[in-house]
Image (cartoon, rainbow, N blue to C red):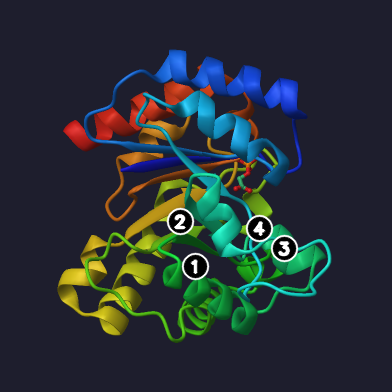
Amino acid sequence: MLVAGNWKMNLDLPAARQLTANVVTSIGKTVHTKVAICPPFVDLDATFNLLHGSEIRLGAQNMHELDSGAYTGEISAAMLKSVGCHYVILGHSERREYFGETNELIARKAQQAQKYRLIPIVCVGEMLAQRDGDRQNAVVEEQVRQSLQGISIASGSELVLAYEPVWAIGTGRTASPDQVEEMHTHIRSLLIELFGQKMGYAIDILYGGSVKSSNASELFARSNVDGGLIGGAALNAEDFASIVKSAESAAAA
Ligand code: PGA
């Protein structure tokens, strides 16, 4: 199980420090669950220092696909590594929708992340109209295939997928456990096709979209759900800790 908190464009440095300290205290030690927080770029260095001594890992929310150069405002994989990042979220639907990120770009970023030994959390998910038109499986399949172009896998732990239906993000409208399980099973079969049986099973598939302490247990209990990518609820240490606890219980069951 992996539970990652996506803080999005929230929290200035003092607030990020405070939340990190609270998360470290509230979560303590986990046995079956890897935990990560993904603060904004400017908070990464300070939060990494506060994670010292805990097993909580650090992730970034985006990254440029090239090594370095004249790309004003961009952040490279090497920079993320140098401030202690272990993960990087790539292709979040907000980046696809508001910043024009395509599957092809996301694939280049994912390859670049792997080159620097950052674990990409590659996000996929359909829009409401696509779900209403019953096209979610085809849409997500295309995203998975194209966003993972050129990615190679040696152990399965160097790649994470996140299924986040756009209509469930920040809306309070969670996908039902049946909808989540159905899509995760579809993604699992694609990963097995792309990377083989062993690797395909080893890759964690997270669900994201209005995961809360009240619904985490029923989602994490489903097969092929290996954890969550948590937005709003990750901004509250107690809520986030309670979601991590649900992952621990699901893994132990
Ligand atoms: P949410 O966001 O939990 O606030 O719906 C999830 C995400 O966008 O990763």
Q: Is mark 2 within 8 Å of ligand 1?
A: no
Q: Which residue is mark 1?
A: 113
Q: Quadrant of residue 76?
A: bottom right
Amino acid of disc 4? Val
Give the number of the mark in front: 1 or 4: 1
- Give residue 46's position: percent from left, percent from top: 62, 30
**In the rendered image, the vertical position of residue 59 relative to residue 196, given as above or below:** above
- Give residue 238's position: percent from left, percent from top: 52, 16
Real-space Cα distance between discs 4 and 2?
13 Å
Whichever of labels 3 and 1 marks the residue nearer the N terminus, that label is 3
Q: Quadrant of the N terminus?
A: top left
- Give residue 226's position: percent from left, percent from top: 33, 49
Real-space Cα distance between discs 2 and 3?
24 Å
Judge whether residue 22 can be spotted in this image. yes
Q: Which residue is mark 3?
A: 95
Whichever of labels 4 and 2 marks the residue nearer the N terminus, that label is 4
Quadrant of the picture in which ligand 1 is shown = top right
Q: Which residue is mark 2?
A: 179
